[in-house]
Amino acid sequence: MDKIVIEHLSLNYSDGTESLKDVSLRIPANQITVLFGPAGGGKSTLLRCINRLNDLADVTMLSGRVLLNGVDVLDPHTNVTELRRRVGMVFSRPVPLPLSIYQNITYGLEIAGERRKARLDEAVERALRQVVLWDEVSDRLQDPAHALSGGQQQRLCIARVLALQPEVILLDEPTSALDPVSTFKIETTLRELRSELTIVLAPHSTQQAARIADTAAFFLAGELVEMQEGEKLFVNPKDPRTQDYIQGRFG
Amino acid sequence: MNLPKPFLTARQTQKVGYAALAGIAVLTVIPIIALFIYILIAGLPAISWEFLSGFPRDGMRSGGILPAILGTLYLTLGTALFSVPPGIAAAVYLAEYAPDNGLTRTIRIAMINLSGIPSVVYGLFGLGLFVLFLKFGTSILAASLTLSIMTLPVIISTTEEALRSVPTSFRVVSISMGASKWETIWRIVLPQGLPGIITGIILGLERAAGETAPILFTGAAFFLPNLPNSPLDPTMALPYHLFVISTQIPGMPIQIQYGTVLVLLTFVLGMNLIANFIRSRARARRHW
Amino acid sequence: MTSSNPSLESTRPPARRTEWIITLLIRVAGYLSIFYVALISLFLLKEGLPALTDVPLSSLAGKFWYPIEGYYSLWPLIFGSLTVTLGAALFAVPLGLGTAIFLSEVAPKWVKETLKPLVELLAGLPSVVLGFVGILVLSPFIRKAFDLPTGLTAFTGALLLGWAAIPTIVSIAEDALYGVPRSYREAALAVGATPWQVIWGVTLPAARSGVLTAVMLGIGRVIGETMAVMMVTGNAPVLPSGLGALFGPVRTMTATIASEMGEVATGSQHYQVLFLIGIVLFALSLIINITAFMVSNRRTQRVERLLS
């Protein structure tokens, strides 16, 4: 089953940095879909379209459709707040909000109107257990979140998104600022989360893409070059450009 | 080759030049230090409980300055009431909402103009609008309103700067979790900018507290036997009182004058110190 | 599609209405500065413009400011303001710029960190305290030093106001100098210029628009200064004659408003003329500030700096 269907999506920014050119693809549910390719290829832009974070940017042209469960999220009548709760986003640098560990995780829930202490407590523990952070921080939930290490912060950021029980999480180079051990922990967590939700990830390296992808899509200069199962794509790409990139001839 | 030998070598010129600049800086700063020490030494003997808590007596030639102290307090609070809420709101607009266009540019020019208008012209304006046209009379209300317009640009610009210094990434994260723009401002941006905002408010009010010209015809009284009962009463105020006792009353004991200056300066500079303390403490604690 | 969550297509939830109102209030507050400037112009014009029709032109354009007998010439006051302002500028500009250059280019960090707060302290000094010190300390000194009949002169005012304008000049000029990219200086040093030559040949010229802004706003502050100038310049509204005028009493526009408005009848000719002076001052400050804004190269201004 396809969770997200993208049809003929094209986009330009006013400053001309990244763009998307007629991108169409289907993101299957309960899998890790990896969008990879050289910088500026349009991966981040595509991620930001899925939860409408591009609304914050200066977009000059936007056409096509992004269907989540068959509903076009680009429609101006979409309830963006609700969309962003269902489609969470994790960024390349860990950005804990300037609040306590506990408040970072309850932030989204409180915005959504949840006030019941028991529910919040429960959500915090569940989310922190999902990212294997609970044992490390359960005795200092009221400490400021910035006191955590970089790797812990990024796991907190993932937990923060998970607390909202989203259907999809989008991760934009989530381990680019982290050491190998933290990276490994996060990749393990993501594999386990697969059964509950759909994951779309822009990795910071081809190695990570190959390690983690169930399905992989290669982006170059705003175009989708090819997309297929990860195992096939990295072993036997169809397009020569993909092959060149994987083998390190450019990028 | 026989080049004419310069009067001074480049190095020597530099030495002389540096010394001259240092001399200028010292010339600027020494009087400042001297002034504060002088006022402190001359004013301290006048300070007593009776001076701070008593009413003026014998045509102000003895007694205390309580009505002036309280009056300045009232005016400062009144100014805060009318300048802080709109000032913060305007700063939020400029930092978070304003598009980069001609209208926003006009707002900025207007702010700079507001901050440059001579204080006595504010006094005229307050007289025309608040005292006469709106019929508030010479009152704390009219004076506070006048001072609040003068204070507004300081509060707006310092608050805007405090809000802008909050990293954009916090805003993006908050919005990516479903918060609206206002929820993001209310829950993240304003709390993080708070120390800067408070600093700006105090600096603005400090200026208002020391002003004389804007309250001359809008709310300040030469002498009042009683404390004001309502915001529609006029009031005595420290800066105006100092003006009165140092120029308008023959045979004024010098002690009382120095004491009044010291109290006024303590009030104003105390606010300045508090503002700087908040700012430096917030900077030390801040982790972004 | 199967979840029980609210649908993605749902339109505005009720919370949006509060938010809409708050955003509206914020927007209105944003425009407040423009509204206030307009309001100030309106009331100054409303009260002051009638002077042009009610007061005979021969009086306004005459030579005397003698309101009791109906002589309302602005010339003595304008000359008073001009004398004091020019005198103050002659004093403040070199001292202010020198201090700014010293702080930004020469002084070691600890010296800068000691001196700067002191200069800022001066900026926070209420005008009336300045006047008080002028009366008690500066004016007796000047009277003795120049052997004058009175120490309350234009020169006293110029000295005092010049000193008070220094923080404005230092603060803005230092900002401008600090903003000159390090690479400019390094390029000049690399070809053998001494640091001293770099200051005059590279840094100052590169920062000239900011330095000019500093000077203009410093002068703007002097023109608008009221209490101190009223207390120390002797309050004599006479046309200055020759250089000696600098050492005689004068009366500025600001001081005239401050000292006479309290005693006039609302709506009288005298009242109208005082507002007319207000219009002149208002227009002057607009011209100075808008020009400074333009000069400073569209750089976003920090109003707090301009104030001091």
Image: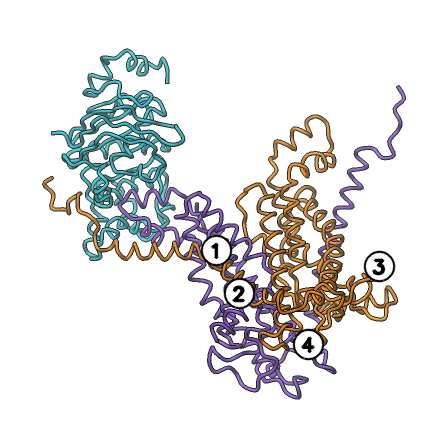
Chain colours: A cyan, B purple, C orange
**Neighbour class for label 3 at 10 Å: few (<14), some, many (≥20)?**
few
Residue at left 83%, top 61%? C241
**Neighbour class for label 2 at 10 Å: few (<14), some, many (≥20)?**
many
* Contact (Cβ within 8 Å) of mark 3 with mark 4: no
Disc sitting over residue C242 in the figure? 3
Label 1: chain letter: C
The residue beneath circle 1 is C34
Q: Is residue A43 above or below residue C122?
A: above
Three-letter code for the amino acid on which mark 3 is drawn: Gly
Label 4: chain letter: B
- Measure the C-alpha gap from mark 1 to mark 2: 14 Å
* Contact (Cβ within 8 Å) of mark 1 with mark 2: no
Give the camera-side residue of C71 and B116.
C71
**Front tag of 4 and 1:** 1
* Contact (Cβ within 8 Å) of mark 4 with mark 1: no
The residue beneath circle 4 is B257
- Measure the C-alpha gap from mark 3 to mark 4: 36 Å
Disc sitting over residue C43 in the figure? 2
Q: Earlier in the sequence, mark 1 or mark 2?
A: 1
Q: Determine the secondary structure under disc 4.
A: helix
B17 sits left or right of B54 in the view: right
C202 sits left or right of A33 in the view: right
**Front tag of 4 and 2:** 2
Give the camera-side residue of C277 and A163.
C277
- Spot the residue most to the left: C2
* Contact (Cβ within 8 Å) of mark 3 with mark 2: no
